[in-house]
Amino acid sequence: MVLTGPVRMSDSVHTRRRILTATGAIVAAATLAGCGLFDDEPEPEPAPDPLQPILDEALAMAAAYDLAIQAQATLAEQLTPLAEDHRAHAAALATLIGTVLPSGAAAPVASAAPPAGSADETLAQLRKSEQDAQTTAIAACLAAPADRAALVGSIAACRATHASALR
Amino acid sequence: MKEQLTAALAAEEAAIYAYGLIGVHLTKEREVKGARDSEQVHRQRRDYLVDRIAELKASAAPAPAGYALPFEVTDRASALKLAVHIEDGVAQAWRAVLPVTEQSQRNAALSAMTDSAVRATAWRKYSGTTPLTMAFPGRPG
C-alpha cells in the first residue's frame, strides 16, 4: 500500500523527475565504466598494423646511419642521404598507418653505441642490415593489400639500392 | 591488369632500344658490360610480359620501330644520363603492376622494379650523379 500510494497521488512532474533520476544513474554508470572503474575485462589492445615492423625498421636504420656518421664523420656525405630515405619511409608509413612517429625519432641513438670498427666494417654491417631490411619489406609487399603494395614495394626497392650504393 | 602489363612492356621495349644507343657511346669496360647486361635483362622481361599478356588473351600493341628520346645522346655523359632515365621509367611502369597482381606475379613485378632501381643507382654512380638513391623508386613525379 505504501508503495502504490505515491504513484496514485503523483503528478506528472514527480513522475518525470523519477525518470530523469533513473536516466541520470544509467548515464553516470556508463561514464564511470568509461573511466575504467569497471574494467574487469579491458578492451584488448588493437593488433599492431602489419606495416608497423617496417616502420620500426626504417627508424632503426636511420638511427644506425646516425651512429655510423657520429663514429666516422668522413662517411657523412655518403650516408646522410640514405638516412634521409629511411626517415621518408617512416613518415610515409606513419601517415598510411595513421600513427604518430615517436618524438625525436633519433632517440634510440642515445642507448646504442657507435660502431667501433673501421669505416669499411661499418659500411659492410650497414649493407648487411639493408639486405635484411629489404627481405622483410619484400615479404610485407607480397602480403600487403593492393592499396599498400606500391608504397611498400618502393621501400623494398630503395633498401636494395642502399645495399648497392654501399658497395 | 592488362593495361599495366602493356605499359610495362612498352617501357621494356623502350629500354631495349635505348641500350642499343647507349652502348655505342660507352668505352669503359664495366660500363659497356653494364649496358649489355641491362639490355639482356630487359629482353628477358619483355619476353615474360609477352607471355603474361598472351595468357590474358589480349594483344599487345606492336612495338614501334623507334622511340622519341627525351634528349639527344651524343657522348658518354648523355648516354649514362639516358640509362638512368630509362631505368627510372621501367621502375615506374613495374610499380604500377604491384597493386594489380598477387603472389608470384607481384613478386616478379617487384623483382623487376628493384632491378631497375639498382641499375639506375649503378649508372648514377658511374656518372658521378648524387644522390645515388631516391627514397621511393618507381614513384611517378
Image (cartoon, coloured by chain):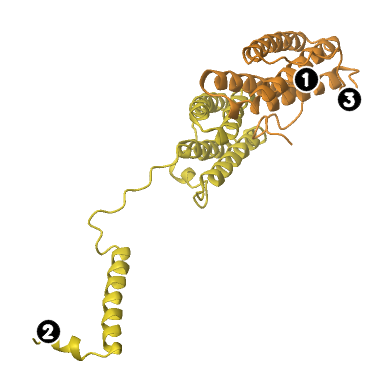
Q: Which residue is mark 3?
A: B71
For mark 1, name the chain.
B
For mark 2, name the chain.
A
Image quadrant in which you'd find residue B19: top right
**Could one spot residue B97 in this view of the protein?**
yes
How far apart are the two marked residues, 3 and 1, measured between alpha carbons? 12 Å
How far apart are the two marked residues, 2 and 3, measured between alpha carbons? 97 Å
Mark 3 falls on what kind of element?
A: loop
Q: Residue at x 17, y 88 (%)?
A: A6
Q: Residue at x 66, y 15 (%)?
A: B53
| Colour given to chain B in the rendered image | orange
* Residue B127 position within the rendered picture, expressed as x and y whole percent measured from the top left: 78, 23
| Colour given to chain A in the rendered image | yellow
**Could one spot residue A73 in this view of the protein?**
no
Q: Residue at x 51, y 26 (%)?
A: A142
Give, as a three-letter code, the residue at label 3: Phe
Image quadrant in which you'd find residue A152: top right
Camera-nearest label, 2 or 1: 2
Q: Which residue is mark 1?
A: B83
User: Is disc 3 surrounded by few (<14), some (14 to 19) or many (20+) residues within 10 Å?
Assistant: few
* Residue A44 position within the rendered picture, expressed as x and y whole percent measured from the top left: 32, 48
**Left or right placement of residue B2 versus residue A49 in this view:** right
